[in-house]
Image (cartoon, rainbow, N blue to C red):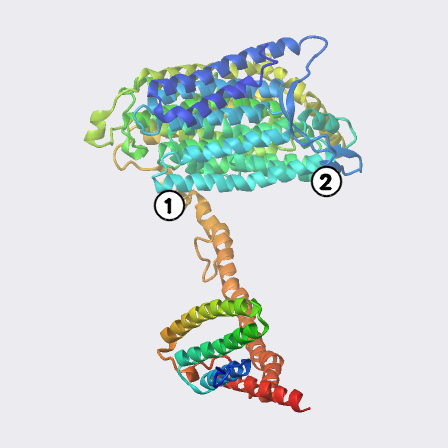
């Protein structure tokens, strides 16, 4: 039986784009650093989805291996980001990203 | 053997002194005595041996009448040519001083009596200082003194002589200030040192003149050059050099106007007064002038100066001695006076007579001082003759020996002083056809005074009524044998020493003058020629050495001595408490003499400035005050002005720095940069999310551009 909806690469790409957009909006709009970090994770996972989708499309394993690298990288990034976050919280007693305004002239 | 090892003679006492300085504190008194007296006894024996060998050596045809010189090494100066200089006529000379020794009849005499009298005084000191603290220190200083004195005597050049000269000055300072806890003693020591320094400056300058003029400082060279006939009599440089040397002699030998330290030097222990300030060190000036005799005869002006200063000192000091009450001070002024006699003799050209008086004086004056020490010892430290009296039979040995010394110094025949003093008076009378005869009267008056004050001392001390307290009277005792034995030996010398110069007129042969002939002979000839020329010009017949006149003069001076004795006998024979001084009949004279002509006060006004002349302070302190004023008002003002100027400059400079350099130079560009950078900064507001937003927008922009382009 022909499935009702054949899930093609395009579906995955749309889902990945939606995830990516959600992540970007989260990064740009949320003021809580923790949520910003979580949004970055969303972006990374959107990328992972794309990589895995193209890997399935071409039948190769390179994309999947790359996705595993990205997951590793994300873990490292989360560790560093949370470390910075804790140090920041100790200094400023806040996790509001608007207070992180030293990065200027 | 003794002659070639003559350097051992000064070295022995030096070793003793070194031993005392390093180990003295830990040694027993007996060991200290053994070491220090031992070195001097050895030195004396070696000196006798050396002189004995020298007289044999200089009698050989080969070395007939030559001085013996031995040079150990070159002590000052090098052969590198760095110390070469040009003498007055441009010929090259090298400044060199040897550690060298010279023995000739002149130094022989000094060598013998310095070591001999020194030995006796060392022995005496073991008794005198037995109960004093600092025993080893005392003997160390004494040995150091002997070393310096022997260096002075035996040196073969002026520089090494100067070393000894300064050495004895130092020891004199140390020993005068031996009781350093007493202010008066340390003051006296400083006074002696400072006054001597003035003389030393003269000596040094004279020495430089000699080095410049003769190109050598060795006695033999200088004497040979002076006798060579290249220099005219009255040469101005030689006159200057000899006058400067005489300034040195004035300091060391306590002549006018530098004599003031010697009476104060009596603050030292009595053996020191005997050894240094009577017998040996103070004759160093006489020695130096006699040593330079070849120069002095070339400078008649200097000779006249020496003679006149000597005669004036003689009568000046003797007159002060007439009324002094401190037994040691009488002897001190007597020493100054006798030194004046010696210079009188040197000045009139009778070098041998002057040296002869040094020789006899060493014995009887040392004896007088040691006797005075024995008296002071017996009197438990009392020195004021007003509190003595009637000691004669209680301390008989001291009394008798001192009496012999008094006879000797007063010039009673046949004691030592008679011969030497008469030789001086006779030479003063007869030299250069009587040119110095006016000084004979001075000398004659001095002889009268000498006799008077010496017998006054004897009568006040040993005769009359006892005037001391009961305690002191109870304590009186004759000194131990270590003190009386030297007295007896010196007394013998005070009798016989003069016989060496028994004059021809009394059937003697004047061996003393004969012995000294090699040193002074040619001088006598030069002077004689001078004298003869002078007389021929004046049209006066040359006066023969008239034996009759000589006898007459002898009789006259014996008469003076007797007269002085008689006057003292009349006035003081029965002296009781509150006895009358005959001179006190003229209070003005008496007070002037008692206060030593107010010379110390005068010096305080003029030279030290301890006293103010009206509102003005002169002298050293005056100079100090003037300097202080100058410093406060001129130098400090300049300093303050400089400071003020610095502050002003600093203010201006800081304003300039703050507003111009910092303001325009440094901050100006910064402000400019900040202003210029302002628009750029607007993009950097520091919110990470905005950066991300811009980045995203940019990315979206690029994507649109590439997609729809």
Q: Is B351 positioned to the left or the right of B334 in the image?
A: right
Q: How many marks?
A: 2
Q: Secondary structure at mark 1?
A: helix
Where is B250 relative to B688, above or below?
A: above
Could you tell me which chain the residue with mark 2 belongs to? B
Q: Whole-percent x and y of residue B599?
A: 46, 46
For the question of whether residue B348 can be seen, the reply is no
Q: Whole-percent x and y of residue B509?
A: 60, 12
Question: Do the residues marked 2 and 1 share a common chain?
Answer: yes
Q: B562 or B239, which lies in front?
A: B239
- At label 1, counting other C-alpha atoms closer than 10 Å, the crowd grade (few under 14, some 14-19, many 20 or more) is few
Q: Residue B587: give its label.
A: 1
Q: Whole-percent x and y of residue B187?
A: 41, 42
Q: A67 or B630, which lies in front?
A: A67
Question: Image quadrant of residue B355?
Answer: top right
Question: Image quadrant of residue B306?
Answer: top right
Could you tell me if the residues under marks 2 and 1 are in contact, i.e. CB atoms within 8 Å? no
- At label 2, counting other C-alpha atoms closer than 10 Å, the crowd grade (few under 14, some 14-19, many 20 or more) is few
Label 2 vs label 1, nearer the camera: 2
Q: Whole-percent x and y of residue B400?
A: 35, 18
Farthest residue to the bottom: give it: B708
- Mark closest to the chain's N terminus, 2 or 1: 2
Where is A61 relative to B583, above or below?
A: below
Q: Residue B236: give its label.
A: 2
Where is B157 relative to A78, above or below?
A: above
Could you tell me which chain the residue with mark 1 belongs to? B
The quadrant in which the N terminus of chain B is found is: top right
Q: Residue at x 40, y 44 (%)?
A: B595
Q: Residue at x 46, y 85 (%)?
A: A22
For the question of whether residue B171 can be seen, the reply is yes
**Structural distance between the alpha carbons of marks 2 and 1:** 46 Å
Q: Secondary structure at mark 2?
A: helix
């Amino acid at each position: 039986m022909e499935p009702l909806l054949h899930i093609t690469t395009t579906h995955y790409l749309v889902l990945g784009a939606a995830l990516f957009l959600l992540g970007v909006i989260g990064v740009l709009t949320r003021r809580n650093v923790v949520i910003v970090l979580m949004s970055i994770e969303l972006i990374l996972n959107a990328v992972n989805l794309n990589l895995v989708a193209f890997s399935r499309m071409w039948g190769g394993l390179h994309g999947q291996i790359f996705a595993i690298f990205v997951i590793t990288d994300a873990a490292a990034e989360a560790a560093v980001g949370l470390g910075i976050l804790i140090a920041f919280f100790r200094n400023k007693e806040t996790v509001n990203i608007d207070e992180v305004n030293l990065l200027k002239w | 053997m003794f002659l070639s090892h003559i350097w051992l003679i000064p070295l022995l006492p030096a070793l003793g002194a070194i031993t005392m300085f390093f180990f003295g504190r830990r040694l027993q008194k007996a060991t200290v005595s053994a070491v220090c007296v031992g070195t001097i006894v050895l030195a004396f024996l070696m000196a006798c041996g050396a002189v004995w060998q020298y007289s044999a050596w200089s009698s050989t045809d080969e070395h007939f009448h030559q001085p013996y010189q031995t040079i150990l090494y070159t002590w000052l100066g090098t052969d590198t040519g760095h110390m070469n200089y040009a003498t007055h006529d441009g010929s090259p000379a090298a400044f060199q001083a040897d550690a060298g020794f010279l023995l000739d009849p002149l130094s022989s005499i000094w060598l013998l009596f310095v070591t001999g009298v020194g030995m006796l005084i060392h022995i005496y000191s073991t008794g005198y200082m037995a109960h004093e603290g600092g025993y080893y220190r005392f003997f160390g200083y004494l040995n150091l003194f002997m070393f310096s004195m022997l260096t002075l005597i035996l040196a073969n050049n002026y520089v090494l002589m100067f070393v000894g000269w300064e050495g004895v000055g130092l020891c004199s300072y140390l020993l005068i200030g031996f009781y350093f806890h007493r202010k008066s003693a340390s003051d006296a020591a400083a006074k002696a040192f400072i006054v001597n320094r003035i003389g030393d400056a003269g000596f040094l300058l004279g020495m430089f003149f000699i080095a410049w003029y003769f190109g050598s400082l060795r006695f033999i060279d200088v004497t040979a050059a002076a006798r060579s006939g290249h220099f005219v009599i009255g040469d101005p440089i030689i006159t200057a050099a000899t006058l400067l040397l005489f300034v040195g002699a004035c300091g060391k030998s306590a002549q006018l106007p530098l004599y003031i330290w010697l009476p104060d030097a009596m603050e030292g222990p009595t053996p020191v007064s005997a050894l240094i300030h009577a017998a040996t060190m103070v004759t160093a000036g006489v020695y130096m002038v006699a040593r330079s005799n070849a120069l002095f005869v070339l400078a008649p002006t200097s000779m006249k100066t020496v003679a006149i200063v000597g005669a004036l000192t003689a009568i000046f000091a003797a007159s002060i001695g007439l009324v002094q009450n401190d037994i040691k001070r009488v002897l001190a002024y007597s020493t100054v006076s006798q030194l004046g006699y010696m210079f009188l003799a040197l000045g009139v050209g009778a070098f041998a007579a002057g040296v002869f008086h040094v020789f006899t004086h060493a014995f009887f004056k040392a004896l007088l001082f040691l006797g005075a020490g024995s008296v002071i010892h017996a009197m438990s430290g009392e020195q004021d003759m007003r509190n003595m009296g009637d000691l004669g039979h209680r301390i008989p040995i001291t009394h008798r020996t001192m009496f012999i010394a008094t006879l000797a110094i007063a010039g009673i025949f046949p004691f030592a002083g008679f011969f030497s003093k008469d030789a001086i008076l006779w030479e003063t009378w007869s030299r250069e056809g009587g040119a110095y005869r006016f000084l004979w009267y001075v000398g004659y008056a001095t002889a009268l005074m000498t006799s008077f004050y010496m017998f006054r001392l004897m009568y006040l001390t040993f005769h009359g009524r006892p005037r001391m307290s009961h305690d002191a009277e109870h304590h009186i005792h004759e000194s131990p044998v270590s003190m009386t034995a030297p007295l007896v030996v010196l007394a013998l010398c005070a009798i016989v020493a003069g016989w060496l110069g028994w004059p021809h007129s009394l059937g003697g042969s004047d061996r003393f003058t004969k012995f000294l002939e090699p040193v002074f002979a040619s001088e006598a000839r030069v002077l004689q020629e001078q004298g003869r020329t002078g007389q021929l010009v004046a049209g006066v017949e040359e006066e023969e050495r008239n034996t009759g006149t000589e006898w007459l003069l002898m009789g006259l001076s014996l008469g003076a001595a007797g007269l002085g004795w008689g006057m003292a006998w009349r006035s003081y024979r029965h002296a009781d408490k509150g006895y009358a001084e005959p001179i006190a009949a003229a209070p003005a004279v008496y007070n002037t003499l008692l206060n030593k002509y107010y010379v110390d006060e005068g010096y305080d006004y003029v030279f030290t400035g301890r006293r103010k002349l009206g509102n003005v302070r002169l002298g050293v302190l005056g100079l100090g005050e003037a300097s202080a004023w100058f410093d406060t008002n001129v130098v400090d003002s300049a300093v303050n002005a400089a400071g003020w100027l610095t502050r002003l400059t600093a203010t201006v400079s800081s304003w300039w720095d703050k507003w111009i350099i910092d303001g325009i130079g440094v901050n100006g560009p910064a402000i400019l940069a900040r202003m210029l950078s302002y628009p750029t900064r607007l993009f950097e507001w520091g919110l990470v999310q905005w950066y991300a937003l811009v980045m995203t927008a940019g990315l979206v922009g690029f994507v649109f551009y590439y997609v729809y382009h």
